[in-house]
Image (spheres, rainbow, N blue to C red):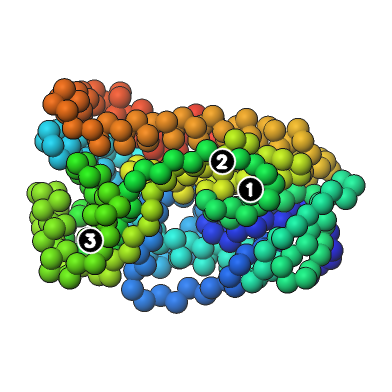
Amino acid sequence: MKGSRYDVVVQGAGMVGLALAVAVARSGARTALVDRVPAQQWRGGEVRQRVSALNVASERWLRRLGVWDAITDVRAGRFEAVSAEDGEGGARVRFEAADVGEPHLGHIVENELVCAMLARAAEQAGVDRFAPAAVEQWRPAGQALELGLSDGRRFATRLLVGADGASSAIREQAGIHARRADYGQEAVVATVTTGARHDGVARQRFLRGGPVAFLPLADGRCSIVWSLPRSEAETVTSLGDEAFIAMLAEAAGDLVGGIEASGPRARFSLARLHAERYVGERLALVGDAAHVIHPLAGQGANLGLRDAATLADEVSAAVDRGGDPGGVARLRRFERRRRGDNLLMQIAMDAFHEAFTRHDPALVAARGFGFRLTERLAPVRRRFMRQAMGLAGELPLAMR
């Protein structure tokens, strides 16, 4: 431990918290990371069930943090196109990276792999890690917060960041209310072998119960994310392999040429969350601690990384000028830069979810019209793609 006073303390060693810790440490801020579990080394082996679709902006930032090449050297599923189908109306739309002059739209990566490489980078950047531990209390102490950890340690920081997920203890202890809504769905995840090659295309089919997505992995298989009503998700997860493969094949239609094999399954609940504030006195929230959206467009991790990059911009600017990284003006600027963008994406995902879980004939016809119109209008497709790639709107300096 370098001392008893830090510029930034981050609670939560997921992808977002680790990336933030690496970035601010490299800017010269004395940084600590607190997490409930010790750092895990990458063990290789079978593809993990939890994956993220990282867009081009996220890739660029991870490259600047020095971890992207290490990730792709292990495995990452590059995709150059996205194909979406309305399972009721049959309309389809396809988005191609070439349409916006890019070689690809993103990569499917295992969360555990990204975290392992970021943890290695954090150690190299001089980030102190306290784990297993959690921030249990804090109080103002001059131009800092004095923190008390669950393991008995005490130290001060000029900025405390909650990157500790949807059930954020930092958010709750700070008294920041979060608006929540349960979608009544769970996502079933697994790794499957499909009858047809994925050819670097991410495919999604919108069904009555929710969308099923086939995300291309580096080894030729696909990771599925199948959103279902909670009772159906429980049933699907408990099926034998043969019955599950048959049900998934029916849900996929002709999207992937059938299902040949499936690995173990898991499921997790889907809900919406948005914190009423992202900041408090010398405190900021990033990632799922601040906002959670439906996974149907795969944007959750990207929004969180964009939060982290934006906050890192503000901290770096303060450190460069000899200023206060936890100052109220810096934190409010971070909140202004991120809250609107996150809220708009949440509204858009809710609108998609609503549109595809209602089944009256007029709405099905309208969805089909929207798909066909988007397929025909290249400028509309390009706008959607640039948004999904993280290249639309204001970019944090780190992502440019």
Q: Which residue is mark 1?
A: 171
Q: Secondary structure at mark 2?
A: strand
Residue visible at 73% across and 71% down in the picture: 151
Q: Is residue 305 visible?
A: no
Q: Which residue is mark 2?
A: 178
Kindly identify which residue carries mark 3: 235
Contact check, label 2 and label 1, Cβ < 8 Å = yes
Question: Is residue 255 among the parts visible in the rendering?
Answer: yes
Which sits earlier in the primary sequence, circle 2 or circle 1? 1
Q: Quadrant of residue 129?
A: bottom right
Query: Mark 3, residues whose alpha carbon is within 10 Å: few (<14), some, or many (≥20)?
Result: few
Q: Quadrant of the C terminus?
A: top right
- Few, some or many residues within 10 Å of mark 1 (<14, 14–19, 20+): many
Q: Is the residue 117 above or below the residue 375 in the image?
A: below
Which residue is pictured at 64% across the width and 42% down the height?
176
Amino acid beneath label 1:
Arg
Kindly state the secondary structure of the residue where label 1 is placed. helix
Mark toward the start of the polypeptide (1 vs 3) = 1
100 lies above or below 145: above
